[in-house]
Structure formats: structure tokens, C-alpha cells
Image (cartoon, rainbow, N blue to C red):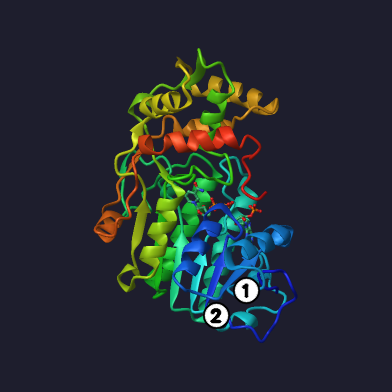
Amino acid sequence: MSEADGTDGDRSQEPPTILLTGFPGFLGSALIERLLDRGDGPIACLIQPKYRALAERRAASLAGSGSDRIQLFEGDITRPGLGLDDGLSALESVTELYHLAAIYDLAVDLEPAEAVNVRGTEHVLDAADDLDIDRFQYVSTCYVSGRYDGVFTEDHLREGQTFNNHYEETKYRAEVAVQERMADGLPATIYRPAIVVGDSETGETGKYDGPYYLIRNILSQSSACSITTGLPGGADSELNVVPRDFVVDAIAHLSAREDAVGEVYQLCDPAPLSIPDFVDAIGEATGHRVVSLPSTKPIAKRLMGALAARGDPAEPATLDYLDHPTRYACPNARRALAGTGIECPPFESYVDELVAFVREHPDIGDEAMT
Ligand SMILES: NC(=O)c1ccc[n+]([C@@H]2O[C@H](COP(=O)([O-])OP(=O)(O)OC[C@H]3O[C@@H](n4cnc5c(N)ncnc54)[C@H](OP(=O)(O)O)[C@@H]3O)[C@@H](O)[C@H]2O)c1
């Protein structure tokens, strides 16, 4: 264990009341800032040993050097007892658990995705049980929907859907496990963000995945003519994108409410753009004339695979979202957030900030953990 400044653990410090997995990740880092702002904690963060240096830097910048508000515990959710050296004994004071750790990679193989997303979540649920916590806050994803054909709401889960990739399928199985424990009495709240991009005010992000492949690909081409791929059915599909500040503001607000226990909240854009309108919005923000060339998915995937192989910003697995048949509705989240001022801004209102950030920070990769 160590304090935020990375010194050896001090058992005399205030015991943690929150355990959070998924630090120093993209959403976990931003969420912790909100939790500290409202005076919660101390927060025990389960971190992988490989991220110790980054976690120490981030914890010190969030909580202040030497602060005990963020306490780092090396572990691994794929192992029973979360792989903690001393088991859960140092966490007995914890009353609330935020579970965000996952492999978030659309191209992940089945085995590691099962180990982390499914069995890892089961281990975290077991830890919640052992610690007898009062609140379990679980970050799922809208894409537990898989390729559900129609409008997917917070009431849907087991719909016989097929999946675009192992990430979606294993996050689905993880949420099934969480909902089963809820049915057995676990006081939990489930948050399902859509595709999360950077901050809507500053454009800041820690990784360029998902829609950033499209932004960077367009930016890498001539502004007079930038080519993208259009798939059959794409005009009828929507890309549901949300900025990180909306997601963490919503989780921070809802997680503090008693009436959120037992609920599922889809944190999505209630009025997302169609794929052609989304591409047009990026074209306008970049100042590029974008031409969409019709293609089939197998050909487009081969082409994108070749681009990725030569180091261009491309991920073939993202193409499945250009003809995705599912639309997302979030009546539960909208009802709960009404009057709070927390709402998803339209993509067109912040796409300029996203593009400006990418232009100013060309060296960020598609991995969050740098
Ligand atoms: N970002 C999005 O667009 C989005 C949208 C919807 C839902 N979500 C969900 O939100 C949560 C957080 O996502 P994020 O974007 O913040 O992802 P992220 O930046 O990759 O953070 C997740 C963290 O969990 C860690 N982790 C992986 N395996 C672990 C293990 N065995 N033990 C402990 N930690 C482990 C990851 O480390 P590695 O680097 O080693 O993998 C990473 O540090 C995830 O559950 C994700 O499914 C994200």
C-alpha cells in the first residue's frame, strides 16, 4: 500500500471508506476528482503494479502530495481476493465500492476479456459481499445491447442479442452477474455510458480510441478531399457519443442518491447524430471536405487492417459501429437528472473542442495508460 505521494503505507492514516477499481484509467481518474470534490473518501484504489508510477503521479496531482485521500493498493481483479497481498483486511472500513476496471478494447481476444470483465467482476462482487458494503456502483456500457435490433432501454438486458466483439459480450455477461447479485439483495446502481470522448469544455482526453480514429484519419488527409468509408445501412445508424464530463458528473450525482439503489442508468445522448451527420460534423470541425466512398464491411475491414498495420490511426473493429442497428433511450437517467443541470450536450456543440485538442496533442495514442 502507499499514500498518494508514493511513500510506504502508513497504517495510522485515516482508513478508506471507498474502494475503486479502474484507476488510473480514463473514467476512473476523472470520477475520483468528483468524489474528492464532494468530500468523499479516503479512497482506496486497486491498481495494477505496472501502473504504480503513473497512479502515484495522478494521485498526487488529484489529492495533493502526501495526502491520504487516495491510497493505492496493488492488486489484480482476475485473482480471488483481488490479488491483494494481505487479502481484504486493510479494506474492512470500506462501505462503498466503485467497479470500473475492465479491458476496454474492441479487438480484445475472448480469454483475457473473460478473465478481466467477467471473472474479474465476479471477484469484485465477492469482495463486496465479504466487505458487507452498503453501496456497489458498477460501470457497465450501453453496448451490453450487442446488435439488438431496435431501441434498447434501461429495462433491457437479456434479449438474445448477438455481439459485435468480445468486449461487448463479456461486459454483457458481467452486467448479468451484477444484476443477479442485485436480485439477491446487493444494493447496487448500474451506469451504462455510451461511447465516451473527451471533455466537452476543453476537449481533453487521455486516449484516442473510438471516434478519434475517424478524426485523426481525416486530419491525416488533404483538407481538399478526405476519404472515409460508408457502409450499406450506415445512413440509418446512429453513433451514440457522450463527453467524459457528462458521464462522471452523472455518476457522481446519482451515486450519492439513495433512490438510485437498484436502478440502471443509460448515460447516452438522447438525440445522437446519424453516421453521415456525425462525419459531416467532423468534416466541418476539421475544415476538411470529406467524401464518403461506399464499400462493403469485409473490404473496408481489410483496408483498415492494412492502414493499421502500417501505423496509421485505424481500428477495423470500429467499422461495426458504422452499421450498428441499435438505438439507445435513457428515460430513467433523464428522469433522475432532470433539474440537476447535468445533461448530455449535442455533439455539434463540442466537436470543435475535441478536434482542437487532437491538433494540439498529436502524440497521445489509443491507450489510456500513458
Ligand atoms: N471509455 C468508454 O468509451 C466507455 C464507454 C462505456 C463504458 N465504459 C466502461 O467504463 C469503465 C472504465 O473505462 P475506461 O474508458 O476508463 O477504461 P480504461 O482507461 O482502460 O480503464 C480501465 C482500467 O482497468 C484496468 N484493468 C484491466 N485489467 C485489470 C485487472 N486485471 N485488475 C485491475 N485493473 C485492471 C485497466 O488496465 P489495462 O490498461 O491493463 O487494461 C485500466 O487501467 C470500463 O468498465 C468500461 O467498460 C467505458
- The residue shown at (56%, 16%) is 222
User: Badge 1: how crowded within 10 Å, few (<14), some, or many (20+)?
Assistant: some
Q: Quadrant of residue 22?
A: bottom right
Residue 44 marker: none
Task: Name the amino acid, label 2.
Answer: Asp
Q: Is residue 155 above or below residue 178?
A: above
- In the picture of the structure, the residue carrying the numbered disc 2 is 130
Quarter of the figure with the N terminus: bottom right
Ligand 1 - quadrant of the structure image: bottom right
The spot of residue 131 in percent (x, y) is 54, 80
Q: Is residue 77 visible?
A: no
- In the picture of the structure, the residue carrying the numbered disc 1 is 67
> Is residue 270 left or right of 60 when viewed as pictured?
left
Local secondary structure at mark 1: loop
Question: Is 55 in front, or is 188?
Answer: 55
Q: Is residue 363 visible?
A: yes
Q: Hey, which residue is sitting farthest bottom in the picture?
A: 12
Are discs 1 and 2 less than 8 Å apart at CB?
A: no
The spot of residue 260 in percent (x, y) is 33, 68
Local secondary structure at mark 2: helix
Q: Quadrant of residue 190?
A: bottom left
Mark 1 C-beta closer than 8 Å to ligand 1: no
Q: CA distance from mark 1 to mark 2?
A: 28 Å
Q: Is residue 361 above or below residue 43?
A: above
- The residue shown at (54%, 47%) is 167
Task: Name the amino acid, label 1.
Answer: Ser
Q: Nearer the viewer, mark 1 or mark 2?
A: 1
Mark 2 C-beta closer than 8 Å to ligand 1: no
Q: Is residue 299 above or below residue 182?
A: above
